[in-house]
Amino acid sequence: MKSRALTVSAAQLGPIPRSATKAETVARLIKLLESAASEGAQLVVFPEAALTPFFPHWFVRDRSELLTFYETRLPGPETQGLFDAASELQVAFVLGYAERTAANRFFNTAVLVDELGEVIHKYRKIHLPGFELKQEGAPFQNLEKRYFEVGDLGFGVRRWGNAEIGLAICNDRRWPETYRVMALRGAEVVCLGYNTPALTPHLPESDRLVDFQNHLSMQAGAYQNAMWVIGTAKAGTEEGVCQIGGSAIIAPSGEIVATARTMGDELVTAEIDLDMVTRYRRDVFNFSQHRRPEHYSIITDPVSL
Ligand code: ING
């Protein structure tokens, strides 16, 4: 039986300047989408906050400016061109963006848009790092807790074509629950974007390890849950904050099959074998045969046995 092959691209972005219009940024996304289509990609994964600079790195005093960073409709007038290009090229994509709902709630969101240009799945970031209050004296902020609510959609999984797709966003990739919950729900490919500073002001000892911990998190998640992970960076120095690149396509074996080599707009494309998920879940990570959650929390005094 023919294996379930799927060609995917991580569409890494370089910095998005605060002065950029959304039209200029969307033009960059369309260019990457067209290149990916020419390489045969069927699914393209853009980063977190792919329409704007990562504004949680700033204390935005002016609320009217802050509101310009959010999308109230998707597609909206500024993003329709991306959806049109995708449906013309018949390429599906994952897009990270700041969402403002009709009920005036704010989320760090990602959507899966199919090759017809339809939004078929949505995820709202659950693990919000950083702070609600401005960190005085910090070289840059992380105010996601100020600008977003915790996601209220859980870790859903959506069938697309012959693949089971899950979505995550940035800091989610550092938490094992992210991958395990979706693996237990059958996810075979987790798509995630990230904006990760090269410096961690509150834990400087980890600065030398930021790239290692980026790939470690995704490789561990992929291997320990027998799934493909596509991680796409917003890289480069964006409004004074240097962000790591390292976009990668990672196999259920834990191997990095392709990774970015620049800090700018760059496509990382690979043909992935979805049946590798089936093989690893039939053997090493056969949850029903080997996993015993009913035994994990039994506490007995080992000495008394
Ligand atoms: N950014 C960072 C991330 O999780 C961070 C924040 C960096 C947390 C390093 C801990 C260590 O990659 C976002 N946007 O979540």
Image: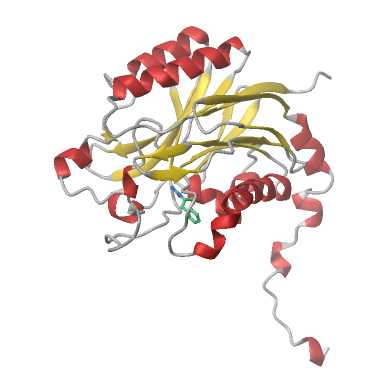
Is residue 175 visible in this depiction of the protein?
no
Corner quadrant of residue 16: top left
Q: With 273 as the anchor, is 149 left or right in this view? A: left
Corner quadrant of residue 43: top right
Is residue 65 visible in this depiction of the protein?
yes
Name the residue rendered at 26%, 30% in the picture: 19
Q: Which is nearer the eye, 298 or 206? A: 206
Q: With 97 as the anchor, is 227 left or right in this view? A: right
Q: With 178 as the anchor, is 15 left or right in this view? A: left
Q: Position of residue 278 (x, y in %)?
A: 77, 36
Q: How many marks?
A: 0
* Color style of the picture: secondary structure
Image quadrant containing the N terminus: top right
Q: Position of residue 202 (x, y in %)?
A: 44, 64
Whether 278 is drawn above or below 295: the answer is above
Corner quadrant of residue 97: top left
Whether 89 is drawn above or below 33: the answer is above
Q: Which is nearer the eye, 300 or 262? A: 262
Name the residue rendered at 75%, 40% in the picture: 255
Whether 86 is drawn above or below 17: the answer is above
Q: Position of residue 192 (x, y in %)?
A: 53, 38
Name the residue rendered at 43%, 21% in the picture: 29
Whether 86 is drawn above or below 267: the answer is above
Q: Position of residue 66 (x, y in %)?
A: 22, 41
Which residue of the protein is positioned furthest toward the bottom in this rendering?
A: 304
Q: Which is nearer the eye, 12 or 147? A: 12
Image quadrant containing the C terminus: bottom right
